[in-house]
Image: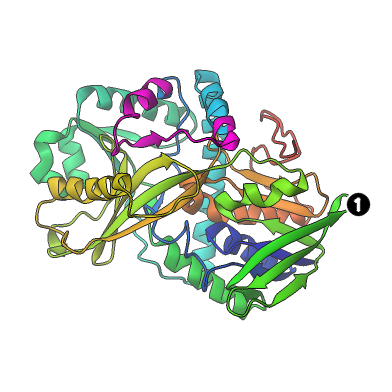
Amino acid sequence: MKVVVLGAGIIGVSTAWYLLEQGHEVTVVDRQRDAALETSFANGAQISVSFCEPWANAGAPLKVLKWLARDDAPLLFRPKLDPHQWRWGLSFLLQCNDAAFERNVAQLVALGRYSHESLKALVAQTGIQYDRLERGILHFFSTQQEFDEGAAGAELMRHHGVDRRVLSRDEVLKVEPALRGFANGIAGGTFTPSDESGDARVFTQQLALRCQQRGATFLYEHDIAGIEAAGGAVRSVQLRSLQTGERRTLTADSFVAAMGSFTAPLLRPLGIYLNIYPAKGYSATLALKRPQDASVVSMIDDARKIAISRLGDTIRIAGTAEMAGYDTGLDSATSRVRCQALIERYEELFPGVADTSVPNFWTGLRPSTPTNVPYIGRSKLANLWINAGHGTLGWTHGAGSGRALAELMSGVRPALDFGFCGEVPAGSATRMVAA
């Protein structure tokens, strides 16, 4: 089968790899000059199977209201005259109850476990190097209330078979001794030894090269000018070269939409309405002045809702989400505040360890659904498949999402209990993508 994959982030490239594994002919299209130059470029670097709780929970609405006036809030909702934003927000509120939270956690853990197994096998097969650290993920809390809530969350995850351990302050410091200077600011923590970290951009670009070596075609610097559909199927995709302006038409047996936040507007003219809205996330990558004093274990700072991951001789601090449309700029007053908050917090935790004078700031649009559960499966058009809406978990769920979709496209039901688009597996909610 000839397949065109739209998007060369971690999701699109993983899908391409597994389609090649299934024996298909693959072409990948992306508007950037290389793979993983948008949302996959500088994320939090965590592969967090065990730290995958949905944003929507019973306590979320009150927290969001309290954060409305804070430019540095972990989740900042900026109301716009955008019906898609309001649709997303109302759907999010409907998910803020215990029953929905439990259902969504089950979906995310199932996909995460399947994806982690897929990633480990893929790395063993390819030998890709990407600053991988298999040291677990440590979540530390600064107040007793946060710690108590974290311990309750750990109990929920253990109910789903996740080994998330509750740690005292002293046990937190044993896992990551670099936190000793901040010991008085730690009430306790949780730790999952099976999680890991690594550079998603490096991994994705290396996997793209291996796809090319296996015969895949990558059309970089090509924008999608339109999709032609007729008779309940996609006929072709029209492309425009960003270098020359030349237009070309791609035909195929099947098409995959894996363009992150841009998947939703791309498919609306086809009558497919995905409830995906961009969450603008930020990161700062800092060179280490004293690598020997820097943390090694990937961490989540609950007070600020940020991830801290070691990538060789650099440190990556990432987090916060701003629901403000498709803006990726770093020059606004809000963006400057949010960027500065990242490095100020790192300096508070690890004074003098990193060079904060020349931070490498970045922002990307996380393609978020109200449930945090992605769309994976067939659309209402017979030969159009979707792999999008992974939010903050694209790196965590990338390999598994690509493998699962490739299996579905090849007529194989993936071995996990997940609500794929257009079907209702036992114990799962319906997942449809058509209006």
Q: Front-most of 130 and 327?
A: 327
Q: Residues within 10 Å of mark 1 (few under 14, many from 20)?
A: few
The single residue placed furthest to the front in the displayed view is 81
On screen, residue 419 versus residue 53, left or right, reads right
Image x and y of residue 44, in percent: 36, 52
In this rendering, the answer to whether 112 lies above or below 143 is below
Residue for badge 1:
231
* Quadrant hosting residue 211: bottom right
Q: Residue at x 28, y 66 (%)?
A: 312
In the rendered image, the vertical position of residue 22 relative to residue 196, given as above or below: below
The answer to whether residue 287 of the structure is visible from this angle is: yes
- What span is colored magenta in the figure? 61-87
User: Of 333 and 175, which appears nearest the observer?
Assistant: 333
Q: Is residue 415 visible?
A: no
Indicate yes or no whether the magenta region holds residue 80.
Answer: yes
Quadrant where the N terminus lies? bottom right
Of the pair 137 and 68, the residue shown nearer to us: 68
Q: Quadrant of the C terminus?
A: top right
